[in-house]
Image (cartoon, rainbow, N blue to C red):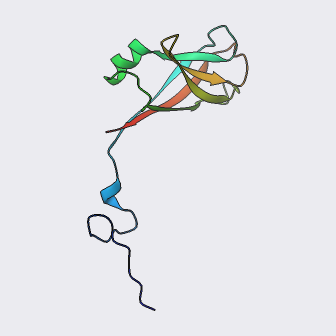
Amino acid sequence: MKYSAKRNAHGSTPSYVDRDSLTPLHLYTGSGVYKDAGSGGYATLWTFGQFKTQFGRDWNNDVVVAAINGDWDANGRQVTSVRVSPSGNRIDVMFDGKNTAPIRVNWAVMWRG
């Protein structure tokens, strides 16, 4: 049986990854120490204004933010997610409960383009 590689829309035969279908990605990484905002369970990573200053663009729904606990030995609180609060004009990191101690959060911000 002869193997015939599938051709992409441009007529070329890709090797492992269809490089013609890849999209450039803006990726920024960093870390910061945050404290619970007092409501029990989140801290603000950036206001919308801070986000624009730091990343040179407005917040929009095409942005993805990932976050993890950057120093488990110093604070065992789990980072559960990142949320956007349009009414509060901010992006928050969410914890698995009230966090009274400072916590190091490593984050990644990305969008296509």
Q: How many labels does the image show?
A: 0
- Displayed quadrant of residue 102: top right
Picture residue at 32% right of the left edge, 23% below the top: 57
Query: Relative to 25, does residue 106 appear above or below in the rendering?
Result: above
Q: Residue furthest right?
A: 97
Q: Is residue 46 left or right of residue 76?
A: left
Q: In which quarter of the image is the C terminus?
A: top left
Of residues 106 and 43, the one nearer the viewer is: 43
Left or right of 78 in this view: 58: left
Q: In which quarter of the image is residue 56?
A: top left
In the current view of this chain or complex, which residue is farthest to the front?
A: 9
Whole-percent x and y of residue 89? 48, 12
Q: Is residue 99 left or right of residue 104?
A: right
Give coordinates of residue 79: x percent, y percent: 64, 28
Give the residue at x 42% y 15%.
48
Front-lying residue, 46 or 103: 46
State whether residue 49 is above or below residue 57: above
Please identify the quarter of the rendering in which residue 68 is found.
top right
Which residue is drawn at the image coordinates 52% and 11% (left, top)? 87
Q: Which residue is drawn at 67% across and 23% down?
A: 95
Outermost residue on the bottom side: it is 1
Q: Name the residue nearer the viewer: 61 or 39.
A: 61
Counting from the top left corner in percent of width and height, residue 66 is at 52, 33
| Towards the viewer: 54 or 59 | 59
Tell me if residue 45 comes above or below residue 67 in the rendering: above
